[in-house]
Image (cartoon, rainbow, N blue to C red):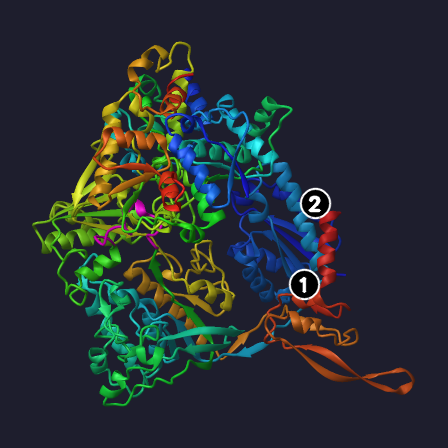
Amino acid sequence: MQRIGVFVCWCGSNIAGTVDVVKVAEALKNEPGVVHSANYQYMCSQAGQELIKQAIKEHNLTGIVVCSCSPRMHEQTFRKTAAAAGLNPYMVEIANIREQCSWIHKDMAEGTEKAIVLGRTAIAKVNLNAPLTPGESPVTKRALVIGGGIAGIQTALDIADAGFEVDIVEKKPTIGGKMAQIDKTFPTLDCAACILTPKMVDVAQHEKIKIYSYSEVVDVKGFVGNFDVTIKRKARYVKEDVCTGCGLCTEKCPMKKVPNDFNLGMDNKRAIYIPFAQAVPKVATIDADYCNMLKNGKCGVCAKVCTANAIDYTQKDEFVEEKYGAIVAATGFNPISMDKFDEYAYSQSKDVITSLEFERLMNAAGPTAGKLLRPSDGKHPHTLVFVQCVGSRCASCAEKGKEYCSKICCMYTAKHAMLTRDKYPDTDVYVFYIDVRTPGKQFDEFYRRAVEEYGVHYIKGMVGKVSPEGEKLIVQGSDLIANKQLKIEADLVVLAAAIEPDKSARPLATMLTASMDTNDFFTEAHPKLRPVESPTAGVFLSGACQGPKDFPETVSQAGAAASKVIGLLSKDKLTGNPCVAHSDEMMCNGCSSCEKVCPYGAITYADKEFRGPNRTTLIRRVAQVNEAICQGCGCCTVACPSGAMDLKGFASKQIMAEVDAICK
Amino acid sequence: MENKQNVCNEIIRRSGVNPRKCMKCGKCSGTCPAYDEMEYHPHQFVYMVETGDIEPLLKSKSIYRCLSCFACIDRCPRGVEPAKIVEAVRLEVVRQQGNNHLKPNDLPEMLDVDLPQQAIVSAFRKYTK
Amino acid sequence: MKVSYFPGCTLKTKAKELDIYARRSAEALGVTLEEIENWQCCGGVFTTSNDEIATKLSSIRALKAAGDKGQPLVSVCSACHNVLKQTNAQFNNDADFAFRVNNYVKPDEYNGETKVIHYLELLRDVVGFDKIKEKVVNPLTGKKIAAYYGCLLLRPGKVMAMDDVENPTIMEDFIRAIGGEPVIYAYRNECCGGYITMESKELAAAKSKKVSENAKEKGAELIVTACPLCKYNLDKHAEDIPVVYITELLAEALGVKE
């Protein structure tokens, strides 16, 4: 028989406000096995933990139940407390009477009654608990960073500087991401390329960093410390280690009409290309959709002009398998499609552009060499209208826009407006806004400068319709402060499109078994206290894949993710989770049901000798669980027809005892 | 005061619109094709009903200027549906005895030989009860 | 195949072309429009207020009549289609409304299952624009045609669900199918002024003028519409550009106009 102690936490008024904690402690005192019951204001505090430790010693407790918040919050805390008092940490059970009880009930009597049931349930379980000892597993001292934008770059550099090997997988031919496309950065207006490209070079030259460009992660197996990852290296038809990046092929290729995605399709590139001058690796790539040689065998110009003999039309996709101890998702963001917002006439006029397209138009390396010219006719625009919140804060239709604030648009629009007025004082610049959101160091000062020093016209209101008429774009919108409907004859309209996670994030999350929110942003393990970790052990989050972010925030988060990775890789061994499956060999009939459902490949079979009747021996095939790989999901225990498979810490009889306790 | 609130509650109920969803972006009024003909504009209808400031709306000719084109309904980023509020305010007026905005006697003057029946029945539906 | 057909008042009087050519063209495409018996005026506009019952009963009866035959309910007039479809949606989404409506129409209760489709949807989804293309004998080759959707065909988008509200393609695809060249212009889904023409000719004129000016400016020689009131407003108040019904153009292309 266990000697169980029950500890009911008030959590200030969080629990005590809706649950009569004294009554709960009293009621649970009479449950089987309970020898001690107490309540306290903050059980997780130093004093609260001391209370538990003393009780364990004083009453020779063999198990404890803490009625408090979610086990996700403090299970670890109380396990440590128990261990400090000499009790096996797996003899601790948490009854969640906060999130699942006091926070969702209003009635004291109801809340109290439910808290008693939850406590009783945990007691029933702990009565059947057995001490468990976790195993250990080794750590592969190498990290994988998925995504080579500024988030991935910073994370990789920080990990590598700590002395660990890092691989970056980037799906595009070059690292650099969105920051490489951007002209200047707010609020200091320093040139994005000038601060990004040195970092790209650092990555390329770092002896601990390897870049898999033009590559994608296609499979992830294993667990924290021991991931097995398959990387697809897409055929670029150029030998990466031979190409010198001289660029001659990109000038001689006769296929000139390939939309240049780096400039968002506003100009053309060749079928063999280097995305931009500072690309890393600086290696040419052939676009197989446009290359005549690959399509019909007629051309071969690039191979002829290449003095390094780097062109290889026969190249195939390659698959590389690599081991990692930690994985960082840094898959970034994209502006949403403007297809569903044609009231702004994006599909009707080339002179209605997105803010990212505007960045390219202002960029010295962009399609207009940095001159602000209208895409339709190359004329200098005199009246510009910026529209904020296009698709952001849009709750009416999920397939259309995003309910969240995209966070970066207010500041980059202020930057665009200011830069326009600075370079072209002959322009009139209007910004339609719902709210101007500038929480950040020097942010509001920046926005005010756009208004006060540069004379940008900020209009509180939204644009309802943009109509291309003649050479003009008639922008009809409301000015809520003047109580007027405005019709502005504009030359260029710039839409601050909402941002969304990159489309590659969702399939990646599935591979990593990392959770996501409904918007496909990766979910953090705790929104305040563990913001750069995924709830999946060994998976970390860097940059806008976790939520909209500007550069300073992205870089800080990238560094934070790196430090978490370094902390993990610094360990030689990882303590595993002892709550794993195990098979009762006497009952196992070797049917393979468990093996088929195991998502981790943790189950193998062995032939074992058993004593048969009349001193004979039998050889039987039985299941064996690799405890280092098993994650304790419990699929096998449900699939097993003979009841041989069970989960330590969550044994079937424990679950049944819990159900019985609830139904009592 | 109490009566004003009752009228607003009735309008909210009848329209099925929750004015609290409005984030005051003004896109409805930026969209409205009848804006210049209105004394009070779509976003003001939503705000005034929300705050109980209903009398000016009941007296205003603005309620007869909405074209029921539903553009504000489709373009509102928050799904507020201002046109339904305008309609509910108009019904509050025309449903009262003697408050028909369009009188049958006015009709002959409005007709011309090409005018489709659709225009007449629509106007009667909108302006009278 | 046979479908139930709700012509509407205007199609029996001022917009006879819209009706006659709709029937003839459909017949040529293998679809018979069976006019439902004893239909009543749809009311021209849908009252969005959720406490109105009486004004929606004629729609319910029409929906019920089509449903009894197991046919979809087709109309050509944008206004009729809008009222029928919105009433149907309210019936299906508002149980209280459905209950009260069926109390009125007892013992002829409606079950909510009738599908409401516009003539254009019939062409796109049932006949298919490819098939229409094959049947065209007088293609409108090179003719620059501006589709005028107006409001009622598309909005509210969630209910009408015919096409993208801001960037529709159904009429443009229709124009292509009969050999014409569609002209895209911003005002194709802006209001013509509608019934305001009764008491403010000026407002209707201003709205219609914008539509036709914008279409002409983008190179249109012709405007097509499915709505008699749109056609009236454009004809009456707007620029010098012909406005014709979709069905008339279709009949011409199919060689069944005369």
Q: Where is residue A115 in the image (x, y as percent from the top left)?
A: 64, 46
The residue that label 2 is drawn on is A27
**Residue A650: which disc?**
1
Relative height, residue C181 to residue A290 (above, below) = above
Mark 1 / mark 2, whichever is N-terminal: 2
What is the spatial separation of the Cα atoms under label 1 and label 2, in whole angstroms? 25 Å
Q: Label 2 amino acid?
A: Ala
Report whether C179 appears left or right of A197. right
Q: Which amino acid does label 1 sit on?
A: Phe
Q: In the rendered view, tell whether residue B86 sits above or below residue A247.
A: above
Q: In this view, does A71 lie to the left or right of A563?
A: right
Q: Quadrant of residue A203?
A: bottom left
Q: Is mark 1 on a helix, strand or loop?
A: loop
* Image mark for residue C19: none
In the depicted view, which residue is nearer to us: A436 or B60?
B60
Residues drawn in magenta: A337-353
